[in-house]
Amino acid sequence: MRTIYFDMDGTIADLYSVTDWLENLRAENTLPYEIAKPLVRLASLARILNNLQRKGYRLGIISWTSKCGSDEYNKKVTAAKEKWLKTHLKSVKFDEINIVKYGTNKDLFRHTDEDLIFDDEEKNRKSWGGQAYDVNNILEILKGIS
């Protein structure tokens, strides 16, 4: 079964436009993760994802915790990201949510060579190989799959 994965920060959640996002992360404040605006039309994304799931696709998240965070802070980051997903994509039932240590190779989470990922970081897309997409045209690409 093929899985469609999404990164969060810079891909579906606009963490980097939150005022003082980096200073907040360095101070171990989860606010930027909590208030990040969506980068895609979430109602459209949810509709497409639910349709793809009905057709047999699995849905997943692979997102990193803070680069400079303590273990305790990264637990809070994980909770904030899970809450963001439940708030903004509440109708989507992800098959897996992987909030992992910063820098973890996302390719480790692939189940098949046909799995695909949307990620804003070129390094992650290159290591993924195969079907790895940036943040441009997420909805259009997903419509092409369905």
Image (cartoon, rainbow, N blue to C red):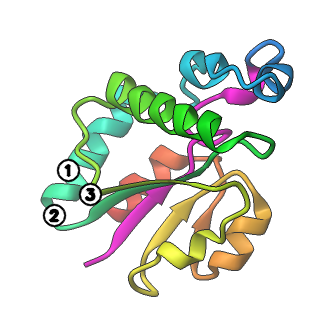
Q: Disc 1 to disc 2, how far (Cα)? A: 6 Å
Amino acid type, mark 3: Asp
Q: What element carries label 3?
A: loop
Compare residues 71 and 80 and report the one nearer the observer.
71
Q: In this view, does 102 lie above or below 42?
A: below
Q: Is mark 2 on a helix, strand or loop?
A: loop
| Residues at marks 1 and 2 touching, judged by CB atoms closer than 8 Å | yes
Compare residues 68 and 127 and report the one nearer the observer.
68
Q: Is residue 3 above or below residue 92?
A: below
Give the mark, 3 or 2, whose residue is nearer the N terminus: 2
Name which quarter of the figure residue 5 lies in: bottom left
Residue 84, disc:
none
Residue 14 lies in magenta, yes or no?
yes
Residue at mark 2: 55
**Split into 4 quadrants, where in the image is the C terminus?**
bottom left
Residue stretch rendered in magenta on the structure: 1-17
Residue at mark 1: 51
> Residue at point 65% right, 28% down?
14
